[in-house]
Image (cartoon, helix red, strand yellow):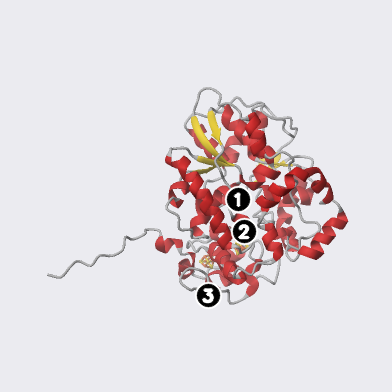
C-alpha cells in the first residue's frame, strides 16, 4: 500500500495576499480610471487600469513585483480610490505600490529617504522646534530645500512640537474615569508623537474620560512613509518591530487604538497586502487594531460611550473630509456618527475624492502641482463653507494640505470630541 502524500500546511491567505494575482479579475470596465483623481490631471499617468492590472501581466514575477514596464507607476499617488471602487476586487493600488518597490530596486533617491524618515526627523528635530519651525517658514530656506532635495517650496510641511507626546504622557497620564472599561494600547505614530501631539493628547483624554486605562507600548514608525517611497526592506524592519511589541498587548486581550488613520491602516492591512510581511503575529495584531473613531463608535454601540457632550462655540456648519486612507478601513465614516451625538453640531461631509497630498506624494517638486489640482474640489468646498470655519479630517498629512491650501484651521475628529466633552479648548 502506498504512503499518503503529505502536503505542506496550506495558508488560506496565500493566494489572496498576492495582489498581483488579482490582475486576472480585471474585466477592463474602466471604473477605476474614471474614479482615479490623478489620471485626469496629468498625461504622465495613464490611469489605474493601464498601470495596474494591464501592466502587471508584464511584470509579475511570483509576487515580489518585477520592475514596471514603464515608469508612470511612480505618478500613482497610492490614494487607493481605485481599489475601493473596483467591482471585481482588483488590488490596483496595492500592486502599483509593490511595483514601485521594484522600480526603485533599493536605489532610493535621497529625497525619498528623507521623506520616509518622519520619525527620525521628529526625534532629532523636536528639541529645536522653535528654530526649525521658524527656519522652515523662511522663503530662502524653502527654495534651497527645493533646489537641493526636491521638496516643493510651497508644499505643506509639519511643525515640530517641542515636547513629544510620550514626554507629556509620562507626566500627565490621565486616570481612567469610572466606570472602568479596561486597558487599551495607544499607537501614537510619528505625527502623534513629534508633530501633531495635540491629537494624541485629545485621544488619550477622550479614552480616559470613557473609562479606559491608556498604555503606551514601545513602537516605531508604522513604516508607511518608507513603503510609499519605495523603501520596502526598511519598512519591513519597522513593521516587524511594531508587531513584536504590539503582539504582547494583544495576547493579553488589550486592543490597539490609534488616531492616525493611515498608520492604523498599515497595521491592519498594509503589512499583509503590500509589505507581505511574514510574521507569526501579523493577523493576530491586525484583527485587534482600531482607528480611534471606529473604537469609540463600537463603545457607543455597546452603550459604553459617555454622551455628556456640550455644544461647541460654532455659528455655522463645519466640513468633514474622510481621507482616502480612512475609507480603505472599510468601516464607513464613524466620525460622522460620533458628531451626531454633539448637541447642535452641523457637519457637511465632503464629497471630494482626495486632498491630493497622499502622504508625501504632494510635497515632491514634480508632483506638487498635480496634488494641488487633485485637491481643488475639496478646497472649493472649504471655501464655500468659509475658511474661517475648522475642517475636520482623520489624517495628519491631509490636514496639513487642507490648511496649507486654504488657510482653514484643521482638526482631527477626536479633537472635536475632546472639546465637546470639555476636556480641551476647541481651538487648542
Ligand atoms: S475597475 Fe477593476 S475590473 Fe474595472 S478596469 Fe479597473 S481594475 Fe479592471
Ligand atoms: S491609487 Fe489613486 S492615484 Fe493610484 S491609480 Fe489608484 S486611484 Fe489612481
Q: CA distance from mark 3 to mark 2?
A: 22 Å
Residue at numbered disc 1: 221
Q: Identify the disc placed on residue 226.
A: 2
Tell me: is circle 1 under 8 Å from ligand 2.
Answer: no
Q: Are marks 1 and 3 in contact (CB under 8 Å)?
A: no
Indicate the quadrant containing the C terminus: top left, top right, bottom left or bottom right.
Answer: top right
Above or below 262: residue 46: below
- What residue do we see at 51% from left, 41% from top? 256
- What residue do we see at 49% from left, 73% from top? 60
Numbered disc 3: secondary structure: helix
N-terminal-most mark, 3 or 2: 3
Q: Are marks 2 and 1 in contact (CB under 8 Å)?
A: yes
Q: 111 or 54, which lies in front?
A: 111
Q: Mark 1: give few (<14), some (14-19) or many (20+) Cα within 10 Å.
A: many
Numbered disc 2: secondary structure: helix
N-terminal-most mark, 1 or 3: 3
Residue at the limit of the structure toward the top, as seen here:
178
The x, y position of residue 43, in whole percent, is 70, 72
Picture quarter containing residue 155?
Answer: bottom right
Above or below 106: residue 314: above
N-terminal-most mark, 2 or 1: 1
Numbered disc 1: secondary structure: loop
Picture quarter containing residue 10?
Answer: bottom left
Amino acid at each position: 500500500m502506498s504512503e499518503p502524500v503529505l502536503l505542506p500546511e496550506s495558508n488560506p491567505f496565500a493566494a489572496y495576499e498576492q495582489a498581483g494575482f488579482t490582475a486576472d479579475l480585471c474585466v477592463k470596465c474602466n471604473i477605476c480610471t474614471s474614479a482615479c483623481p490623478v489620471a485626469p490631471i496629468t498625461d504622465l499617468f495613464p490611469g489605474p487600469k493601464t498601470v495596474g492590472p494591464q501592466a502587471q501581466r508584464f511584470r509579475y514575477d511570483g509576487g515580489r513585483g518585477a520592475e514596471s514596464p514603464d515608469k508612470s507607476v511612480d505618478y500613482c499617488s497610492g490614494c487607493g480610490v481605485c481599489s475601493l471602487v473596483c467591482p471585481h476586487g482588483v488590488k490596483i493600488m496595492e500592486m502599483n505600490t509593490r511595483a514601485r518597490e521594484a522600480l526603485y530596486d533599493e536605489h532610493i533617491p535621497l529625497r525619498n529617504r528623507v521623506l520616509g524618515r518622519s520619525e527620525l526627523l521628529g526625534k532629532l528635530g523636536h528639541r529645536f522646534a522653535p528654530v526649525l519651525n521658524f527656519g522652515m517658514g523662511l522663503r530662502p530656506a524653502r527654495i534651497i530645500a527645493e533646489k537641493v532635495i526636491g521638496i516643493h517650496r510651497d508644499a505643506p510641511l509639519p511643525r515640530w512640537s517641542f515636547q513629544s507626546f510620550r514626554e507629556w504622557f509620562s507626566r500627565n497620564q490621565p486616570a481612567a474615569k469610572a466606570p472602568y472599561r479596561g486597558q487599551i494600547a495607544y499607537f501614537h505614530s510619528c505625527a502623534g508623537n513629534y508633530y501633531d501631539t495635540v491629537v494624541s493628547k485629545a485621544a488619550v483624554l477622550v479614552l480616559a474620560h470613557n473609562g479606559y486605562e491608556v498604555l503606551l507600548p514601545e513602537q516605531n514608525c508604522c513604516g508607511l512613509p518608507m513603503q510609499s517611497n519605495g523603501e520596502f526592506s526598511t519598512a519591513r524592519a519597522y513593521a516587524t518591530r511594531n508587531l513584536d511589541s504590539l503582539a504582547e498587548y494583544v495576547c493579553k486581550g488589550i486592543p490597539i487604538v490609534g488616531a492616525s488613520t493611515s498608520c492604523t491602516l498599515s497595521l491592519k492591512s498594509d503589512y499583509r497586502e503590500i509589505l507581505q510581511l511574514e510574521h507569526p503575529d501579523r493577523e493576530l495584531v491586525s484583527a485587534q487594531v482600531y482607528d480611534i473613531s471606529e473604537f469609540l463608535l463600537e463603545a457607543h454601540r455597546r452603550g459604553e460611550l459617555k454622551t455628556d457632550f456640550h455644544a461647541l462655540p460654532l455659528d455655522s456648519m463645519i466640513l468633514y473630509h474622510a481621507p482616502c486612507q480612512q475609507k480603505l478601513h472599510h468601516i464607513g465614516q464613524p466620525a460622522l456618527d460620533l458628531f451626531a451625538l454633539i448637541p447642535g453640531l452641523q457637519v457637511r461631509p465632503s464629497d471630494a475624492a482626495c486632498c491630493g497630498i497622499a502622504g508625501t506624494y504632494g510635497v515632491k517638486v514634480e508632483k506638487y502641482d498635480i496634488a494641488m489640482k487633485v485637491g481643488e474640489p475639496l478646497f472649493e468646498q472649504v471655501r464655500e463653507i468659509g475658511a474661517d470655519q475648522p475642517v475636520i479630517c482623520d489624517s495628519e498629512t491631509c490636514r496639513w494640505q487642507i490648511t496649507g491650501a486654504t488657510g482653514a484651521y484643521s482638526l482631527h475628529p477626536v479633537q472635536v470630541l475632546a472639546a465637546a466633552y470639555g476636556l480641551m479648548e476647541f481651538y487648542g
